[in-house]
Amino acid sequence: MKTEIRSKHAVVNKAPSVLYMAFVDMRNFTAMVPEDKRGEFQLQSDYDSVHAVVQGFNVGVRVTARVPYSRIDFADDGAPFSFSVSMHFDAVDGQPDRTDFSVEVNAELNFMMKMMLSSRIQEALDKMVDGLAANGQ
């Protein structure tokens, strides 16, 4: 069953190019994981992908498209279910140092997984957007 989850939008006090560059290299995602948690996830990353073992499941994500300073698209690369993620970095009219940031997830989830994961994914996306908005100010 196709499931679409969209984060809230938030304005981040950074130019779209600056925010985009923080996410364009998948090795940066590995650096965001706290040191004490890295061993739990067995993380491996390169410029285009990141792979981890999470609670016994192999999960991989790879970049499928980069639209400079506007959007980055990701897709599963060895995960228990099919999904894609798009991060949007939209310029705020007349304010070159501000970005309207949002994330969109599309996943193929069966009914049980949708019931268990949808709200958690929504919460995680909104928390990430809120965190960027708070730290970018």
Image (cartoon, rainbow, N blue to C red):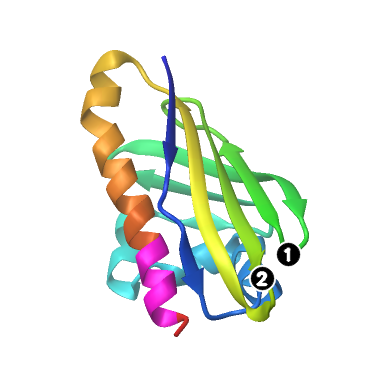
Residue in view at x 36 percent, y 70 percent: 131
Residue in view at x 34 percent, y 74 percent: 35
68 vs 8, left or right, is: right
* Residue 121 visible in the displayed image: yes
Q: Mark 1: which amino acid?
A: Tyr
26 vs 31, left or right, is: right
Residue 101, how many percent across, how many down?
A: 53, 61
**Mark 2 element type:** helix
Distance from the alpha carbon under mark 1 to that under mark 2: 5 Å
Task: Return the disc, 1 or 2, that comes first in the chain's sequence.
Answer: 2
Q: Is residue 80 above or below residue 48?
A: above
Q: Is residue 48 above or below residue 122?
A: below
Majority secondary structure in the magenta region: helix
Quarter holding the N terminus is: top left
Q: Is residue 44 above or below residue 133?
A: above
**Mark 1 element type:** loop
Residue 77, how many percent across, how many down?
A: 57, 35
84 vs 37, left or right, is: right
Q: Mark 2: which amino acid?
A: Pro
Pointer 2 residue: 16
Report if the CB atoms under discs 1 and 2 are less than 8 Å apart.
yes
The span shown in magenta is 129-135
Q: Is residue 35 above or below residue 6?
A: below
Residue 24, how many percent across, how many down?
A: 66, 62
Query: Was residue 132 drawn as part of the magenta stretch in this picture?
Result: yes
Residue in view at x 44 percent, y 48 percent: 52
